[in-house]
Image (cartoon, rainbow, N blue to C red):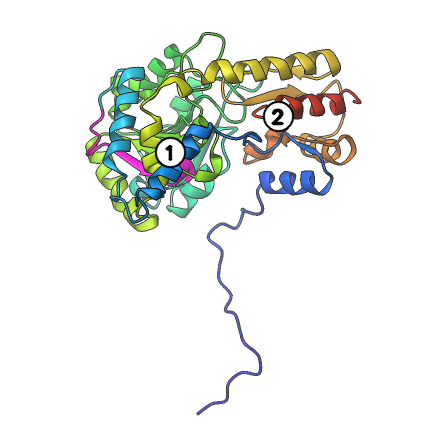
Amino acid sequence: MSALPSSPHTPEIATKLPAVGTTIFTVMSALAAEKNAVNLGQGFPDFNCDPKLLEDVTAAMAAGHNQYPPMPGIAALREAIARKISALYGHAYSAADEITVTAGATQAIITAILAVVRAGDEVIVLEPCYDSYVPNIELAGGRVVRVPLVPGTFRPDFDKIAAALTPRTRAIIVNTPHNPSATVWTAAEMRKLEELLAPTDVLVIADEVYEHMVYDGAQHESVARFPGLAARSFIVSSFGKTYHVTGWKVGFVAAPTPLMAEFRKVHQFNVFTVNTPMQHALAQYMAEPGPYLELPAFYQRKRDLFAAGLAQKTRFRLLRSEGSYFQCVDISAVSDLSEAEFCLWLTREIGVAAIPLSAFYGNGFDQRVVRFCFAKKDETLMAALDRLARL
């Protein structure tokens, strides 16, 4: 018998994601904590949810809802989701076969990608884009095809999207309201996408997590509103964003039965099912639509408070925030630093954390724009504005 090695040995492995390091959100939040900065970087509220929702969770746990729920989610919650989509967007999804509750939107997106993307398939992402899209595609063995949104306006460039479509294109990821730019697709743009994809078999993964944060009287143009898109789309949304409970990590996906059947095959083996008492509480809470119907006014007031302060106290040029809970600003009049360098300096020296838009581009494209999150208490926003006035 050979002797054991003198010290334990950890085998080396070849990484599946060689380009992935620590995310910008982790970096900036850690630096904000270290420097005691006001964190307007990472996108989460610093206020609590409705106490009624917490009471509903407590009641669900006390009622014994603490074991595995059905794999696709409890029936009451799936039925509530289907009713909401029908009421808001006019499309009827089967609660039994076309709605699945997920462990947040991030899990929903990777599950959809793993379900439909095979090795060598191309997936179009519109940059700047949320940072999970590209690694998800690479883990599925797909090839990322990056198409830039129009710099400055961040509107879709359909000529470039059309040029990117090939026989190998499997899917396109569309995000509206958009993170990070806060733009919202119009009905005309959605119809243009519907028309462009009509002669193809390209699928759509529609990231609609900010669906209830659309401002100035506009409406969210869900792919569910457009039959040609709904028939080929996975719609992803988030209870965490809607009800101020991002740490619960509960979301959902809606898709036609054939697509959902494939989605559930992956879902049952990468998460199986989702927190039971939270599902019961959310089903109960959704009986009253007021909280999500009133959300645009709630966040528009915060947007306006923050934007007015920026306009009065700083030399930033504000980009229009049409939706989401982000405000982007052009830093050209304030600093000659790159976006990333400016955000580090701003956190260390001014005490306010922001996120560079260059972090949302594969090539680090720098257009002198950074993103603030205004999903914060008024006093948090005012504290940030007082610090930013020093610029």
Residue 166 visible here: no
Find residue 90 and name its label: none
Q: Amino acid at mark 1?
A: Asp
Residue 55 position in % (x across, y down): 41, 34
Left or right relative to 190: residue 5 = right
Taking depth in this image into account, of 92 and 262 the one nearest to the observer is 92
Magenta segment, which residues?
A: 93-106
Q: Amino acid at mark 2?
A: Phe
Q: Which residue is mark 1?
A: 56
Q: Is residue 97 magenta?
A: yes
Query: Residue at the spot x=57%, y=47% of the render?
Result: 21
Left or right relative to 385: residue 214 = left
The N terminus is located in which quarter?
bottom left
Q: Which residue is mark 2?
A: 372
Query: Residue at the spot x=74%, y=23% of the render?
Result: 388
Q: Earlier in the sequence, mark 1 or mark 2?
A: 1
Mark 2, other Cα within 10 Å: few <14 / some 14–19 / many ≥20: many
Residue 114 position in % (x across, y down): 34, 43
Reply above or below: 187 against 358.
above
Taking depth in this image into account, of 281 and 70 the one nearest to the observer is 281
User: How far is mark 1 from mark 2, CA to CA?
Assistant: 32 Å
Taking depth in this image into account, of 323 and 55 the one nearest to the observer is 55
Residue 177 position in % (x across, y down): 46, 21
Reply above or below: 176 against 348.
above
